[in-house]
Amino acid sequence: MEKSIREAVCVRLREVGFSLIQSRESFARSGADIVAWAGNADGELVPWAAVELEAEKSKRPEMALPELVRSRDLRGTRDHYVVADGEWFRADHDVRSLKKIDGPTAPPYGSGGVVVDEDVAASLILDQMARDANVRRAWADGVSVLGDPSSWPAAGGVMVPGCGVVPVRRDVLWQAQRKAAYESLRRMPFSDQSCPVVARAAAELAVGMHPRTVLDPFCGAGSFLWAVMDKIQGSAVQFTGIDLNHRIADIAATIKRTAPRPVAIVEGDAFTADLPTVDVVVAAPPLGMRLPSGHVLLGGSTTNDMTVAAVDLAVRHLNPGGRAVLHLGMSFTYQKAAESYRQFLASHYRIAALISLPGGAITGSAMPSVLLVIDHVTPGETFVVQLGSDWETQITPGGAALAAALAYIDDRRMAR
């Protein structure tokens, strides 16, 4: 019965001119059972009409108003309806009362347009991924499959069943895919990716080098690479990312299709791949992992610890004068097993900064972490700061801690 009511409502909406219609079967965040999209006065495609269904005759239509308010607040819908026992009701401007009507009103500016809102575009992508996941939930390599990256949007728009490709402005699609990737990956068990605030801070720390080549040997969905790319648009820079998990590498490769400049995404093991030597390495290596065989460190000792080996890998691939910006578990700074290697680093490289972050900087983990900045120059002094609950404010662009770190490490570098 509910399905037939839903279909009848969609038919009415199409009859008055709505071509893109989503139902709660394809999304779970709108606050309404059905959302119909239309163009606005500026030619932008936006969620326009929200419809809440009340199939039970015993319910008063007004009981659906809170869900319509939620839709307005979450998606910015303009027209709000309740369909109860086959009858249509329209909410007033403030979504506080209802008036019985014959049916929905046609979109005043037509049904066409281009999506220019990043959050709206990200919601479309997440809806698409949710549909894929409802059909196919599998486990492989410890990762829950939340959608097939091959079905993600090509440059230009997002495919919506029954509607074709919904056009999205290219720069908006570039940001929206990144938001959707982060949102989906953070829901996965054992996700240890850095939050977007950390990625942006790492980019700020990296771009002072004015790099021509950038490498992320543990790129995941590419958040660190994309953050650096945002900071140096207009420069001729070569970007390379590598990740062992082919599904995650596929997501990064899909996102790169809308990137403002070319980037090479490779599926493979950073410890065995033929990686380039670069001006900047940015990375957030996997936490708590052990290598299957010993990695010989600079200085001659051997380790199976992934974090220690990842730091070593990063500095090995720095050009003279280059910089590595790494987001690591805090234990790297004090664990006894890494003490001799830390001493080696301090005597051969400049440990430019140690920015200590509390739990929460690594998504899904209460583990404290650190942003470690290493310069391939003569050893020198280190900027050290331990941040508390306001750490996000402190390391955003213009934040006090990040500004102080940048001034210290780059001033000291120029002085050399």
Image (cartoon, grey):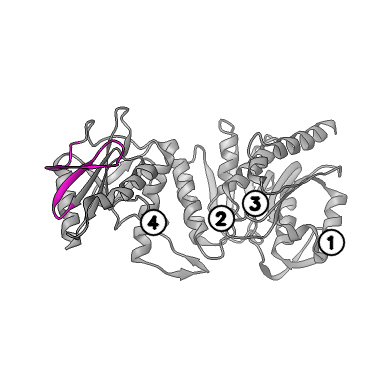
Residue identified by numbered label 3: 283
Query: Percent position (x, y) of residue 69?
Result: 34, 45
- The reply, left or right, for residue 392 in relation to residue 149 is right
Q: Residue at x 60, y 47 (%)?
A: 224
Q: Earlier in the sequence, mark 2 or mark 3?
A: 2
Tell me which label, 2 or 1, sits earlier in the chain. 2
For disc 2, the neighbor class at 10 Å (few under 14, some 14 to 19, many from 20) is: many
Residue 220, numbered label? 2
> Disc 4 marks which residue?
129
* Residue 91 is a magenta residue: yes
Q: On screen, 326 above or below 260?
A: below
Question: Can residue 151 be seen in the rendering of this structure?
Answer: no
As measured in the structure, the alpha-carbon distance from the residue carrying label 2 to the one carrying label 1 is 28 Å
- Kind of element beneath mark 2: loop
Describe the element under mark 3 as helix, strand or loop. Answer: strand
Q: Residue furthest bottom?
A: 292
Kindly indicate the quadrant of the structure image that contains residue 80.
top left
Identify the residue at image location x=16%, y=47%: 88
Question: What residue sits 39% from the left and 45% below the top?
Answer: 74
Tell which circle, 1 or 4, labels the residue nearer the N-terminal end. Answer: 4
Start-end of magenta stretch: 84-106
Tell me which amino acid carries mark 3: Ala
The label shown at residue 339 is: 1
